[in-house]
Image (cartoon, coloured by chain):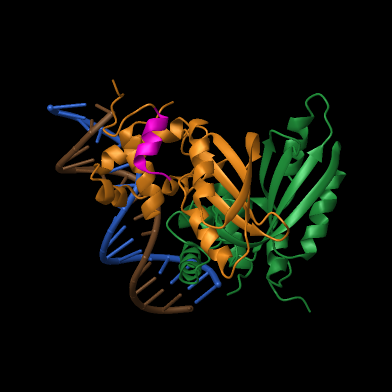
Chain colours: A green, B orange, C brown, D blue
DNA sequence: TTTGAAAAACTTATTAC
DNA sequence: GTAATAAGTTTTTCAAA
């Protein structure tokens, strides 16, 4: 199953406006209620949308690659908050935990493809105060592999590309 | 803000039946629709429930302690799946990722209190094939500190106790 | 705070384009 | 895939306890 531009716009709207109401999704996206309804039912059938709370299956939504990173930052007054926020804003990052001990941050990211990992690491290292990062790939997630809010964490473009589509929703030539 | 027995039953029902519909919650819990509605509105006002998709604020729900554990397991045929499942079933565990590299599993748990950490580690180490674990506390989560499904991961008892209540929902003598 | 019943709002199905 | 409408359900409100 592959999502198209309409699906992605609907899923993003669900995540951004935090609603599942066809009426509200219509107001946000201008996609007619009846179409919204039709698409959502389809995505349910195909397992992309998992329940009445509209949890998203990350695999099926094209975000099947999970990366766990340890991020070491240098100490300076108030650095923790600044770095924490900067990490949170990187596309694909879904969890940022500041921990006790020598590692500082544990960051979890969901990406469409291996190609985006390099970009992710670069963005980590571009943050002022970050000293060192160490990332590992997740092979299988036995728990915690769905999410309600992920679509907040990506541009429409990124998701479309992960399904082999350009911004219009057509396959690029 | 503190949840009571009714709130907890409603939140669990939302997580288990995967719905936010007052009608369905009523069928599961026997709490009248209008009461369900009243309680949900209250929890929204207080920030326990965060949006139309009913994401739960873990802090406010009494699950504010996050623990990240590395779990090293010994290799044997098919051990990965067995251990992954066993880890997933431990109360409080919300994420289990099997990774490339020497660490094997990264496990994330949400707990009501420090008192439950010891129990958690014991349960890890009781699993057949687990060699070594290393856990750290999360001090602040800059992202990823809400969840739709958490209430699936606890018994009603555990949540009630974390709010200083016994199984009837009354404060114990 | 709880509740049952009434009113209001919304979703879903249907039809035609 | 869209649009409009009608039918069916559901949520939400409300006044009383």
**What secondary structure is the magenta-colored segment mainly?**
helix
Q: Is residue B29 left or right of residue A28?
A: left
Which quadrant is home to the C terminus of chain B?
A: top left
Residue A122 point in image, percent of width and height? 85, 52
- Picture quadrant of residue A100: top right
Front in this rendered view, residue A24 or A20: A20
Residue B155 is one of the magenta-drawn residues: yes
Q: Please tell me which residue is depicted at 44% across the width and 26% down the height of the picture.
A: B1
Q: Please tell me which residue is depicted at 52% across the width and 36% down the height of the picture.
A: B118
- What stretch of residues is rendered in magenta? B154-163
Q: Residue furthest top?
A: B173
Q: Is residue A46 left or right of residue B143?
A: left
Residue C1 point in image, percent of width and height? 28, 28
Q: Please tell me which residue is depicted at 44% across the width and 35% down the height of the picture.
A: B44
From where the camera sits, is residue B78 visible? yes
B80 w.r.t. A28: above or below:
below
Residue A167 is one of the magenta-drawn residues: no
B157 w.r.t. B90: above or below:
above
């Amino acid at each position: 199953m592959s999502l198209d531009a309409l699906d992605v716009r609907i899923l993003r709207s669900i995540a951004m406006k935090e609603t599942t109401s066809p009426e509200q999704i219509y107001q946000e996206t201008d996609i007619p209620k009846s179409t919204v309804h039709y698409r959502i039912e389809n995505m349910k059938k195909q397992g992309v949308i998992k329940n009445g709370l509209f949890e998203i299956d990350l695999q099926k939504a094209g975000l099947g690659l999970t990366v766990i990173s340890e991020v070491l930052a240098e100490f300076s007054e108030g650095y923790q908050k600044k770095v924490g926020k900067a990490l949170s804003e990187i596309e694909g990052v879904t969890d940022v935990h500041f921990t006790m001990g020598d590692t500082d941050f544990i960051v979890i990211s969901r990406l469409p493809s291996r190609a985006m990992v390099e970009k992710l690491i670069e963005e980590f290292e571009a943050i002022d105060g970050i000293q060192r990062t160490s990332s590992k790939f997740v092979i299988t997630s036995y728990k915690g592999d769905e999410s309600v809010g992920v679509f907040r964490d990506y541009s429409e473009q990124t998701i479309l590309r992960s399904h082999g589509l350009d911004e219009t929703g057509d396959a690029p030539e």
